[in-house]
Image: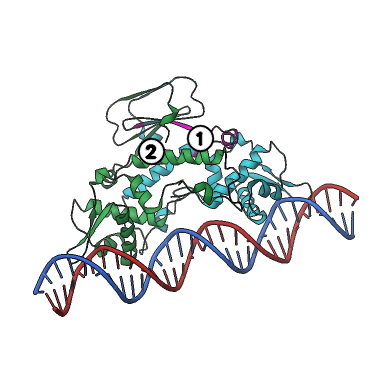
Chain colours: A green, B cyan, C blue, D red
Amino acid sequence: MRITAVEEYGLRCLLTLARSGPSKQMSISEIAGLEGLSVPYVSKLLALLRKAGLVTAVRGCGGGFSLARDPKEISLYEVLKGLGGPLIDPGHCERYAGQLDQCVHHENCSVHDVLGGLAGYVREFLADTSLEDLALGHTRGFVRRVGSEVTISRGTPSKNVKIITDKIDEKSIQ
Amino acid sequence: MRITAVEEYGLRCLLTLARSGPSKQMSISEIAGLEGLSVPYVSKLLALLRKAGLVTAVRGCGGGFSLARDPKEISLYEVLKGLGGPLIDPGHCERYAGQLDQCVHHENCSVHDVLGGLAGYVREFLADTSLEDLALGHTRGFVRRVGSEVTISRGTPSKNVKIITDKIDEKSIQ
DNA sequence: AATATACTTTACAAAAGAGTAAAGATTTTG
DNA sequence: CAAAATCTTTACTCTTTTGTAAAGTATATT
């Protein structure tokens, strides 16, 4: 389980755009210079981000890239999904079928259940962090565990929060 | 960000051992047959798991593999770490330094902060799930979100749980 | 001891991912 | 309209991961 190079560097390029201020154009060579990456590689990364609808490109003299939306409205989940897909994608079981046509655990697969649960958990985290959060450095999560219960707050926990968990609706699990 | 083949298949092999009951020996070809994998591939996976101290091997006629510990005492975190390392390892920044000797974000890197936060979050989840949980199918998490607060319970939330989050101790973040 | 069973190790081939190179297309500027 | 700037696309190479093959080592049984 790991972050791919495309995800790591693509995110950094996007973050550089977010930091450059709204609707300012930034060229590939500028971004490459700031991030210590080659121009062709940054071209490829930005092409992915453009296809994912996260940046817009303007060709020709004076052109460049800029964010397609307010950085507040771009979640880390969208970014990583655009750059390489989610932790568990719909084709997971087909891809990991071993030597067979169909995975032996096709029905009632606890591995898939738990990895899917993890993927949802990761998605919660990523969907809750915006590009703006990263640009401003609001990146730490606050975690508290009480027995088997875990409470996480993102952002700045300035006010008291009270959660009473009675019977949790299983349908709320993504 | 994805699960590697070695992690997926290695976990399945270990789970097959966990389901086979305590201290029973199981041969590579048995496991390969049950999982739909080739014998040489399962050999490689089990060698990794043995080096990680999760299974023990007995050679010769009547030999085979068995879990090194009670499945209740083996966390998913240990398994995935043994099979391929954590989401973010200590060498992350050195590996993703682009064309430079040192990552341009060497100091004060918000990308590393947030990915490190995510890695800790994932670790919480994985460390809280044992091989026994998987073998028995206790794999679903229960997630409830209230604003920017997220509450997760693992296992069966049979009794009412009340969490009052006042000022969260930042030192509790791993 | 010889044989069969079963783990162990090393080496290798195929596939996927990472990164580079080069030619093409579009827009602005002079 | 020509030239410069800048994005776009395709193809290619290198490295890592995936999976296979084969030879080696250890143990139990006869």
Give the spatial CA distance, label 2 vs label 1: 18 Å
Q: Tell me the residue that label 1 is attached to.
A: B128
Query: Label 1: chain?
Result: B
The residues colored magenta run: B126-149
Residue pictured at 38% horizontal, 38% vertical: A124
Residue B174 visible somewhere in the drawing: no
Position of A43 relative to A18 (above/below): below
In the rendered image, which quarter contains the C terminus of chain A?
top left
Question: Residue B11 location, x and y as percent?
Answer: 58, 45
Q: Position of residue A146 (x, y in %)?
A: 44, 27
Secondary structure beneath disc 1? loop
Q: Is residue B80 left or right of residue A160?
A: right
Residue assigned mark 2: A124
Neighbourhood count class around disc 1 (C-alpha, 10 Å): few under 14, some 14–19, many 20 upward: some
The residue at 62%/36% (across/down) is B71
Which chain is mark 2 on?
Answer: A
